[in-house]
Amino acid sequence: MPAWDALGTEHPLERRELGVINLGDAGEVVVDGTAHKLGTLDGLYAGRGSTITLSGAGACFYLVSAPADATHPTVTFGRDTIEPVRIGDPATASARSLYRYVWGGGHPSCRLQFGVTVVDAGSVWNTMPAHLHDRRTEVYLYTGLPADARVVHLLGRPGATRHLIVRDRQAVIAPAWSVHSGAGTAPYAFVWAMSGENTDYGDLQGVPMEAL
């Protein structure tokens, strides 16, 4: 990974931590000389100061990063080895599996949280009822959508939402004042990543339906 001019540092993780999710075929992430294999939707956390090399002809690595004031060890997360949290309900077209990789209750981080949610076949909603994060920004990256499928993503203040039509491997940034929710036209998954004042996964504010 080369230096990023926006950071003004010699290498990208000089003062930052990193999350990696592989959206494509199997690939390899080398952290400080140690190779880690990542399959589809597997993840990796690398701490402040790490040097990173990415490889794999069919791999597609999605990177999320945040400032860090401490160094935590490298760890990998296999989607097939993480016990998912089952949320939602088929009756409301919102059944899904939540895979928490770095989330405040497991591997430590400074500010970064990330994981993957896989929406069940037959369900469409990824987050409903909607919510806000007063102390964090969250990003959704959609993946696994067929070429002719889309997600209708809702964003904005609860009483004045707008929408985006999002295709495969496109991301949406939700600042603290914006809801983040969407419905897909075909089965899909999304990578969620947050950074802010704390790593309390449950620090959110629900938005009732009548407020939308």
Image (cartoon, rainbow, N blue to C red):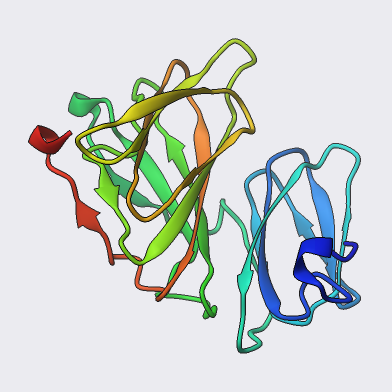
Front residue of 20 and 64: 64
Using the image, determine if residue 202 lies above or below residue 145: below
The residue furthest bottom is: 70
Q: Where is residue 79 in the image (x, y as percent from the top left)?
A: 57, 52
Is 13 on the left-hand or right-hand side of 109? Answer: right
Front residue of 28 and 70: 70
Using the image, determine if residue 158 lies above or below residue 45: above
Q: Where is residue 206 in the image (x, y as percent from the top left)?
A: 19, 51
Using the image, determine if residue 116 lies above or below residue 34: above
Say if residue 114 shows up in the picture. Answer: yes
Residue located at (13% from left, 35% from top): 209
Q: Position of residue 200 (x, y in %)?
A: 35, 72
Residue located at (38% from left, 30% from top): 182
Q: Position of residue 6 (x, y in %)?
A: 77, 63
In the rendered image, which quarter contains the C terminus? top left
Say if residue 46 shows up in the picture. Answer: no
In the rendered image, which quarter contains the N terminus? bottom right
The residue furthest top is: 148
